[in-house]
């Protein structure tokens, strides 16, 4: 076979993934955006022999944290401790192979961030300006960006924050908002003078333009600008062409890294100065634990820096952080920022506030041992260039038709036939017995690793995964066409060639799939006796004749339609529970006629029995007396009420809603609930004197 190439990266590779805010759970949009791409790249580079460090950590400062703490009635420290642990659990469950995962609320990070700020201050990198900022006269405090909401000037969506509109993704300033409102008190904020440190970004337009458009830095070639995604460079050019404005690098807030300057009481570092320095902190901690010099990764021309992020963070990583690194001096700048677009869910944008999301920890709890299935689907639909969409039906189809029917089926057939005909031992073959068809398969094995490696290094993970799956498809097709179960009866030498070739294909899958499906790859490697393979191993005859293959259970179980239906129903139930009674009322719906209203049959019902739905954290199974009958109704209220609290209640019930099967149980109606400002649910309870069956008009 052809000689195998070297895949060693020529320089150290410093990789980061966006620090997730420690104010909520990790959902599939986060994973597909910044973490799965980083993990695939890091795993591949390690297998290729590259010197790679991949770091991340929890972003634990900023207004988003204090807002969540206020909502939950706890301290910011309690919030970040809770979600730091929850996020690590999610990442561990999905086998994210960070070299180090840190947190920005540590004393170590505080010192590093303050030293960085002071260096910039000494170099004259900031402007100190007294300007009018929004102030809440009722709460008596200045308002950080996330403490202000209003109408987005770009898309007219309500509920936009002072720094960003979550509907259209536009980056905003608080004064851009139409009809701004304080989230602390609901009052209309006033403008009041405060002194802050600003980064005069306009000073840097010239070199940033060269850096983004031509890939040059300080007059020297720095990176291949054409390798950057079009939406990344395009967004940066748009900002530069419109003129970069000064941006505040400090905030009036009581939670964060204190500004280390006399007289700056009550001021902290802006989260987009604080958080990126978290990458450096994480690297320093990792280096100390591993006897390395962190400067070799951040301050050496022999290192390359890549940021994996979502498209909402492009400006911060491509413009603001490079300015900070250059101003400080001695640091390398990113050579690529392969930001992904957004992942939508079942026809709508993922929304944490409306609970329209697939939460990773919830998935891992409901689907134990299925992390590779989720990784596979998310990698297959990764929003690399434009927004993509996750649906449970597509999840089912990809698991069933691709993982189970292609990869799983092929591996199973190879092992079963090898045990049947050769007692599990790899049959010996004579290369002279190979046909053109056999040699074509082996030639594909020799070229596939380089092809997949090139795709991964160009951050084309969807294509790389399909190329790796193509090896399994090739093996499946080859075995089906060669029919060793028939050939064995008349030609044992030919059967040996066929199965030996299939074994080599399977072994190559065990290596090439590792960056994408680490658990599955580990199972395959164990069964085939492959120990810590390198990427180059995949381009050779990996399994020697006479080797004994181990046992292997079925790799992938098929997903039943009922599972899909239950997950979609859970989403709808969660959305219904979370959208009733928002703090800010939604616009009135389209006017309906009186005749339409008369079609709704609302009645008083009495709950006579209630139990939890197995393996469904949010569903209760209610038996309700309606005056017409006793019927089963499922309701997504299990996180708010125990079954004992529900039995005996009178409820408002929509009785003529079309029946719907959820978790294999037919639900015959809907219980109406009200959501309070703090997100808890309350029954819409009929007054005393009403009885089951009374019609609500």
Image: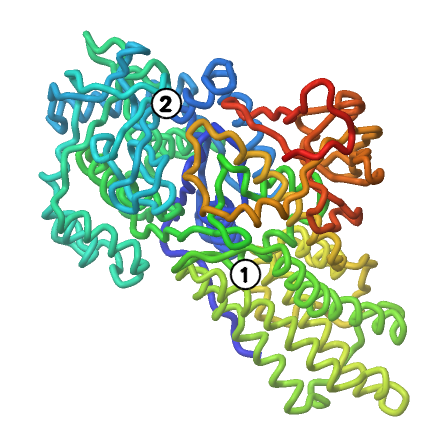
Image position, residue 390 (x, y; %): 55, 55
Image position, residue 690 (x, y; %): 73, 24
Secondary structure found at label 1:
helix
The answer to which of 192 and 58 lies nearer the viewer is: 192
- Residue located beneath label 2 in the image: 183
Note whether 587 is above or below 139 in the view shown. Answer: below
Left or right of residue 403, residue 72 in this image: left
Secondary structure found at label 2:
loop
* Badge number at residue 380: 1
Residue at 63% x, 67% y is 508
For label 1, count other residues whose C-alpha is less than 10 Å away and answer few (under 14), some (14-19) or many (20+).
Answer: some
Residue 555 in view (yes/no): no
Residue at 47% x, 53% y is 41
Pair 2/1: label in front: 2
Image position, residue 459 (x, y; %): 42, 59
The answer to which of 637 and 596 lies nearer the viewer is: 596
Left or right of residue 281, residue 668 in this image: right
Q: Quadrant of residue 363?
A: top right
Note whether 526 is above or below 317 in the view shown. Answer: below
State how the image is colored. Answer: rainbow
Q: In which quadrant is the N terminus drawn? A: bottom right
Residue at 63% x, 35% y is 697
């Amino acid at each position: 076979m052809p000689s195998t190439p070297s895949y060693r990266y020529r320089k150290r590779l410093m990789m980061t993934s966006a620090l997730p805010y420690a104010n909520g759970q990790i959902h599939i949009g986060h994973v597909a955006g910044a973490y799965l791409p980083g993990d695939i790249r890091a795993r591949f580079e390690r297998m290729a022999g590259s010197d790679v460090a991949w770091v991340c950590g929890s972003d634990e400062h900023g207004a988003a944290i204090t807002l969540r703490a206020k909502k939950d009635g706890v301290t910011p420290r309690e919030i970040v401790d809770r979600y730091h642990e929850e996020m690590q659990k999610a990442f561990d469950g999905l086998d994210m192979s960070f070299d180090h995962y840190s947190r920005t609320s540590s004393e170590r990070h505080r010192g590093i961030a303050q030293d960085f700020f002071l260096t910039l201050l000494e170099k004259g990198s900031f402007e100190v300006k007294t300007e009018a900022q929004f102030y809440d006269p009722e709460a008596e405090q200045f308002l950080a960006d996330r403490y202000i909401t209003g109408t987005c000037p770009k898309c007219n969506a309500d509920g936009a924050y002072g720094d960003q509109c979550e509907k259209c993704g536009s980056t905003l300033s608080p004064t851009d908002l139409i009809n701004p409102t304080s989230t602390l008190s609901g009052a209309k904020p006033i403008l009041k003078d405060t002194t802050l440190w600003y980064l005069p970004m306009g000073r840097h337009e010239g070199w940033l333009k060269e850096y983004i458009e031509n890939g040059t830095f300080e007059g020297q070639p720095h990176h291949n600008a054409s390798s950057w995604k079009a939406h990344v460079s395009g967004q940066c050019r748009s900002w530069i062409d419109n003129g970069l404005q000064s941006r505040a690098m400090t905030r009036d807030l009581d939670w964060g890294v204190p500004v280390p300057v006399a007289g700056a009481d009550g001021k902290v570092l802006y989260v987009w100065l604080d958080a990126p320095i978290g990458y450096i902190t994480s690297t320093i901690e990792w280096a100390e634990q591993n006897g390395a010099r962190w400067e070799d990764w951040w301050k050496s021309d022999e290192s390359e820096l890549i940021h994996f992020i979502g498209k909402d963070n492009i400006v911060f990583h491509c413009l603001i952080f490079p300015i900070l690194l250059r101003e400080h001096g001695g640091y390398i700048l990113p050579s690529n920022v392969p930001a992904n677009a957004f992942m939508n869910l079942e026809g709508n944008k993922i929304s944490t506030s409306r609970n329209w999301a697939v939460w990773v920890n919830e998935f891992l709890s409901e689907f134990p041992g299925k992390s590779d299935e989720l990784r596979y689907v998310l990698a297959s639909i990764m929003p690399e260039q434009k927004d993509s969409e996750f649906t449970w039906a597509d999840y089912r189809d990809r698991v069933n038709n691709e993982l189970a029917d292609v990869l799983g089926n092929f591996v199973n057939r190879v092992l079963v036939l090898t045990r049947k005909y050769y007692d599990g031992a790899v049959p010996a073959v004579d290369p002279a017995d190979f046909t053109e068809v056999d040699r074509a398969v082996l030639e594909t094995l020799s070229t596939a690793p380089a092809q997949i490696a090139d795709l991964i290094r160009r951050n084309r993970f969807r294509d790389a995964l399909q190329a790796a799956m193509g090896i399994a498809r090739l093996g499946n097709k080859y075995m089906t066409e060669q029919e060793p179960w028939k050939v064995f009866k008349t030609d044992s030498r030919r059967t040996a060639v066929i199965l030996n070739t299939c074994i080599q294909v399977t072994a190559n899958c065990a290596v090439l799939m590792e960056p994408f499906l680490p658990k599955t790859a580990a199972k395959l490697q164990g069964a085939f006796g492959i120990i810590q393979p390198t990427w180059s191993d995949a381009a050779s005859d990996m399994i020697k004749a006479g080797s004994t293959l181990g046992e292997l259970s079925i790799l992938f179980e098929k997903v039943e339609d009922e599972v899909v239906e239950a997950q979609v129903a859970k989403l709808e139930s969660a959305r219904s529970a979370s959208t009733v009674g928002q703090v800010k009322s939604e616009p009135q719906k389209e006017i309906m006629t009186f005749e339409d209203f008369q079609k709704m049959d609302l009645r008083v019902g009495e709950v006579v029995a209630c139990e939890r739905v197995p393996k469904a954290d949010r569903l209760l199974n209610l038996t309700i007396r309606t005056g017409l009958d006793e019927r089963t109704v499922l309701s997504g209220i299990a996180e708010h009420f125990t079954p004992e609290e529900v039995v005996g209640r009178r409820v408002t019930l929509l009785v003529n809603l079309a029946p719907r099967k959820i978790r294999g149980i037919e639900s015959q109606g809907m219980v109406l609930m009200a959501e309070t400002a703090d997100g808890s649910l309350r029954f819409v309870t009929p007054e005393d004197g009403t009885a089951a069956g009374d019609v609500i008009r």
